[in-house]
Image: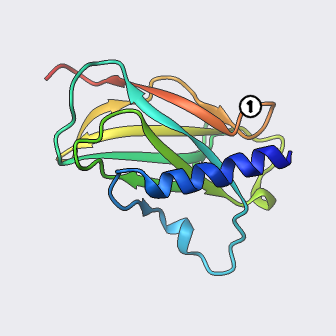
Amino acid sequence: MKLRYVRLGIMALTLSACSVAPQQRGPEADVPGQTVSAAVTGTVSYRERIALPPTAVVKLQLLDVSFADVAATVLDSLTLRPSEGKQVPYEFLLRYDPAQINARNTYAVQARILVDGKLLFTTTQAYPVITHGNPLDVNIVLQQVGAK
């Protein structure tokens, strides 16, 4: 268990040093009194051998997807702005409060890449995390939406 926290700490330091422009966190990051002591980490990539333009953004969300007939609840969100020619894979860290996690619920990470507001890549499969024996570290492979 301690090794996991050491690994998360190293990942956080690594993320702060990587060549991706400053991250924009979702509104959940600014909630006063919120206790955040856990995180989901991983990478986002795609198989196509194309470089993203400088206007590309990578958007990630940590979601509670427990109920099929209800919109997913966003636990954290993150926007990465690739810069200086940095290409995939992109590393990420999504924070959450363990006290808000229900062991019976299902949580997943969703990712998208947009260029000038137009969807270019997205997740097409579930990437479950946190509960039901799922990992805290995921490698997300996005699929291209339409051909350019």
Kindly tell me whether residue 37 is visible in this rendering.
Answer: yes
Across and down, in percent, residue 114 comes to: 27, 42
Query: Which of the two residues, 13 or 75, is positioned nearer the viewer here?
Result: 13
| Structural crowding at the residue carrying mark 1, measured as other residues with C-alpha within 10 Å and reported as few (<14), some (14–19) or many (≥20) | some
Q: Is residue 8 left or right of residue 18?
A: right
Residue at the spot x=32%, y=39% of the render?
113
**Label 1 secondary element:** loop
Q: Nearer the viewer, residue 16 or 125?
A: 16
Q: How far from the left and from the top, in percent, is residue 135?
A: 71, 33
Residue 104 falls in which quadrant of the image?
Answer: top right
Task: Residue lying at the far bottom in this picture: please name it.
Answer: 32
**Can residue 68 be seen from the camera position used here?**
no
Task: Tell which residue pokes out farthest to the left in this image.
Answer: 148
In the figure, is residue 39 to the left or right of 126? Answer: right
Query: Residue at image x 73%, y 40%?
Result: 130
Tell me the quarter of the image containing the C terminus: top left
Tell me where residue 57 appears, x and y as whole percent: 29, 47
Q: Is residue 97 above or below residue 40?
A: below
Q: How many marks?
A: 1
**Residue drawn at point x = 77 percent, y = 57 percent:** 98
Image quarter in which the N terminus is found: top right
Q: Position of residue 35 (x, y in %)?
A: 72, 70
Question: How was this image coloured?
Answer: rainbow
Q: Is residue 111 above or below residue 59?
A: above
Front one among 115 and 43: 43
Find residue 146 and report its image quarter: top left
Along the horizontal axis of the image, is 24 left or right of 27? left
Q: Residue at horizontal 50%, vertical 29%?
A: 140
> Which residue has dot 1 on it?
134
Inspect the image, locate mark 1, and give the three-letter code of the amino acid beneath it: Asn
